[in-house]
Image (cartoon, helix red, strand yellow):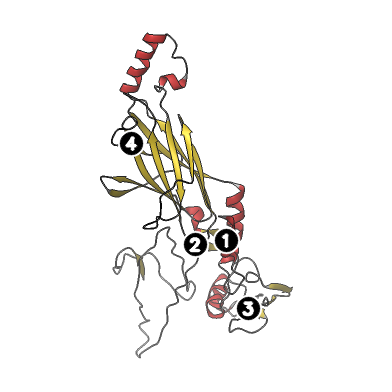
Amino acid sequence: LIKSGQPPTETDHDYQMTRKEPGFTQWSCRGVSLFFRVQLPNTVHKKSKYGVTLTEDNCVDKDYSIRCPGGWKDKGDGWCLPPKYYAGPCRKQNYFGEYNLGREYSNPSSKVYKILWAERCGADWPCKEVIGRQCMPDLQYVHKGVWHLTSCKDKEVCQMFTLAEEAKKDDWRMLLVEVPPTSAVAVEVGSVITLKAVNRFREQVAHDHKGTGVEDMLGKDEFTLAVKKGDIVEGEEWEWTNSFRGAAPYVELHNPLCDRFQKFFLGLYNNNKVGGSAKVGVTINRLATKQTKAADSRCKLSHIRGAPDYSKAAENEM
């Protein structure tokens, strides 16, 4: 019996491993707790030895419909040859064709057999989807010297802030966006139309009789969104690497890494002058770009044990 998050009861469990299903996958964007309890059949009246194998992987699901493990050559007739880099304990060619002895785990072409063989022999089948593609980015912000985590949904306002006018206390906010592996996101900042903004608009119309555009309606709010990539190193001189200014500043953040989130610190500044305090909303949208597609393809290979380290190629893309 396996339960994630809390110890299992007799009837409350996530999964039950059997001979037909000897393994399971439990994926999480930020980690998960697993609890195991082994229950032997009633017919067993002696001590038994058992083992539990945990394999860390960046893959949500593997394609066991393919004949051979990733990187192996299909010779036909069910036989597969390993690549030169394979250094596992199994023989130099392995059979994954149909050979049914009445039990699924004895049939080399079955998913169960391949799961057991992969753990024993140190090889993996191709990945269908990496975990990072299932995860949403995290947004954190500083309030009164403490970091606060916000749950974000795609294409929805993630968090709203009230910024004082320029050069006043609280005229800016420090944000931290953590982008999932093999992912890209767009961070957008825009004014939230409030009663104060509407009144500013009315006053402006009364004075100049113009006020026909969106910028007028928003009170001509202007913000700066500054970006710094990576961790903060103590003692290091702080410097923003990029900045974007306008009524609705926008930035794209890319993470080509296979196995970890990438940090981006953002500074959100209010550039409005006297009487220009503003309420702003921060929206995070997931993107599908050429970079994410390339990273996704590369990272589907990076989990194959013994293969060239495809994940290191990410360092050259950053």
Residue 140 in the image, given as x and y percentages of width and height: 36, 48
Specify which label sits upstream in the sequence, 2 or 1. 2
Residue at x 57% of width, y 65% of height? 302
Specify which label sits upstream in the sequence, 3 or 2. 3
Disc 2 target residue: 259
Which-is-in-front pick, marks 3 and 2?
Answer: 2
Q: Residues within 10 Å of mark 2 (few under 14, many from 20)?
A: some
The vertical placement of 151 against 127, above or below, is above
Q: Amino acid at mark 1?
A: Cys
The answer to whether 78 appears left or right of 41 in the picture is right
Residue 164 in the image, given as x and y percentages of width and height: 31, 31
Q: Nearer the viewer, residue 252 or 107?
A: 252
Disc 3 target residue: 86
Question: Decide: marks 4, 3 in contact (CB < 8 A)?
Answer: no
Specify which label sits upstream in the sequence, 2 or 4. 4
Disc 1 target residue: 299
Residue 90 in the image, given as x and y percentages of width and height: 60, 83
Q: Where does the C terminus fall, quadrant-wise?
A: bottom right
Residue 48 in the image, given as x and y percentages of width and height: 38, 88
Q: How many marks?
A: 4
Q: Amino acid at mark 2?
A: Asp
Label 1 residue SS: helix
Label 3 residue SS: loop
The vertical placement of 241 against 99, above or below, is above
Which-is-in-front pick, marks 2 and 4?
Answer: 4
Q: Nearer the viewer, residue 69 or 12?
A: 69
Question: Decide: marks 3, 2 in contact (CB < 8 A)?
Answer: no
